[in-house]
Image: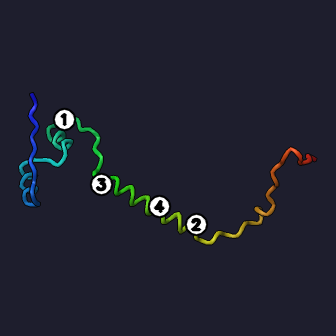
Amino acid sequence: MFELVSRVANDADDEAALRELGWHDHPAKAMRAAGKEVPAVVALNREAQLEEQIKKLTEELAAARAAPKPAPSEDAKYEPQPRTITTKVA
């Protein structure tokens, strides 16, 4: 038989007191404290972190698209035309 034990902290003082007594905010932390193998843990705010990263990258992309483009190089003026079936080969 297994017993699941949990406690709820009603405020920051309760939380501090429970942490001093060894309570954990995630089962994986309790497993680590017990010397057991810890499963992978995903941060609760991971989604918010990724959304912030997407926002930042989207802003960078918009700025790059709005920035003036450099003038084409001299070599770019002489790019060979793609060959087609009707192109005569010398």
Position of residue 19 measured from the top left corner of the image (x, y, whole percent): 10, 52
Q: Is residue 42 left or right of residue 21?
A: right
**What residue does disc 4 label?**
57
Of labels 2 and 1, earlier in sequence is 1
Whole-angstrom CA distance, mark 3 to mark 1, is: 25 Å
| Residue lying furthest bottom | 68
Q: Which residue in the protein does label 1 denote?
A: 36
Which of these two is toward me, 16 or 66? 66
Q: Height in image: 46 above or below 58? A: above
* SS assignment at label 4: helix
Dot 1 crowding, Cα within 10 Å, few <14, some 14–19, many 20+:
few
Q: Earlier in the sequence, mark 3 or mark 1?
A: 1
Q: Which residue is mark 2?
A: 65
Q: Which residue is mark 3?
A: 45
Name which of mark 4 and mark 1 comes first in the sequence: 1
Q: Are marks 3 and 4 in contact (CB under 8 Å)?
A: no
